[in-house]
Image (cartoon, helix red, strand yellow):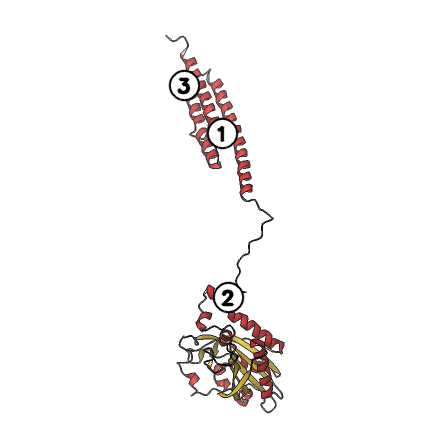
Amino acid sequence: MSPFPLHKKEGKEMQEKLQALKVQALAELEAVQTPQELEEFRVRYMGKKGSLTELLRGMGSLPAEERPKMGQLVNELRQLLDGALTERAGALQKSLQEQKLKEEKLDVTMPGKTKPIGGLHPLNVVLNDVIDIFQSMGFDVVDGPEVETDHYNFEALNVPQDHPARDMQDTFYLAENLLLRTQTSAAQIRTMEQRKPPIRIICPGRVFRADEVDATHSPVFHQIEGLVVDKGVTMCDLKGVLEQFAHEIYGPDTKVKFRPSFFPFTEPSVEVDVSCSECGGKGCRVCKDSGWIEILGAGMVHPRVLSGCGIDPEEYSGFAFGIGLDRLTTTRYKISDIRLLFENDLRFLEQFDK
């Protein structure tokens, strides 16, 4: 027969288990390195299915007089672990904060890093320059719709029904009387209908024609139409404005040549050439050995166009011109293929960010 009563032996065993659990728990808690490991420790020892809970359930086998003492010991261990858990959580938080501050330490003596930013497209660069030039000469900038009626795109511009420009191969028709504008001259008609002379405007924008895509043609391109209407406007005024424009764009040594031409909405009409900036007028591949590059068409506004807009051609006269922005850009920057302007190749576009 054992020298000790059975219930004393069971009580002693439970105390030994509590002591072993205490030593084991404190050792494990000291090794915890992350908040996740700390939470796993709490669940393992103090959760609903944790080690302390299992010990409490085992107290049912103890005699009634041993249970209060053992319950007190279990609660003391729980309080001890709870305090140690809180202390370890604070230490971990401090350690993680110190590590984060160390990793995110900023050396204020280091030079800043330049962030890449977008730049203007070469078409926009040239367009802004053109707008600045004409605004300095007193021109306003106006806009017009890209989807136009047959009236504004053709009829009001003195383009008869049998004109080749009305052929379906040249114009994108959306309906019988609706089309994508083939020229920004339509905005001039709208302006003359809404304003009284004097008028001095430019209208930049996209235009559309059913052209085959190649190095010099595109079905979508850009124009800048100009219009001046006032009393006593002559061909000399047109020549002076366009020569000033050419000198501003290509340089003061640029030569300007006017050639007779024909446009339904101007009379007389001219084509305007400038001396090739690549060869200085000597002849090269860019100017096809002619020494000249065509940049725009112009002329005196046809009296029918003026009268159709309610302006008396006996009292007022005017001139108009149409500049191809794409041609202007390719000649200015010596770009050999117009398609480069529309392909959005950053290797090409980044050359113009400087």
State which tag comes first along the sequence, 1 or 2. Answer: 1
Q: Point out residue 349 in the picture as x, y percentages from the top left corner.
A: 49, 66
User: Residue pushed farthest left?
Assistant: 1
Outermost residue to the front: 282
Disc 1 designates what residue?
Answer: 30
Q: Nearer the viewer, residue 278 or 69?
A: 278
Percent position (x, y) of residue 193?
56, 82
Foreground label between 3 and 1: 1
Q: Going 54% across and 36% down the picture, which residue do you hit?
A: 95
Foreground pick, 150 / 114: 114
Residue at point 51%, 69% (across, down): 122
Residue 250 appears in the figure: yes
Q: Which residue bears the numbered disc 3?
A: 61
Mark 2 residue type: Gln
Which residue is located at x 46 percent, y 64 percent?
347
In the image, residue 262 sits, relative to residue 103, either above or below, namely below
Q: Residues within 10 Å of mark 3 (few under 14, many from 20)?
A: few
Q: Do labels 3 and 1 touch, CB within 8 Å? A: no
User: Residue beneath label 2, please?
Assistant: 351
Q: Residues within 10 Å of mark 2 (few under 14, many from 20)?
A: few
**Disc 1, SS:** helix
Apparent side of residue 170 relative to residue 311 in the rendered image (left or right): left
Of the image marks 3 and 1, the number of the one nearer the N terminus = 1
Q: Earlier in the sequence, mark 2 or mark 3?
A: 3
* Image quadrant containing the C terminus: bottom right
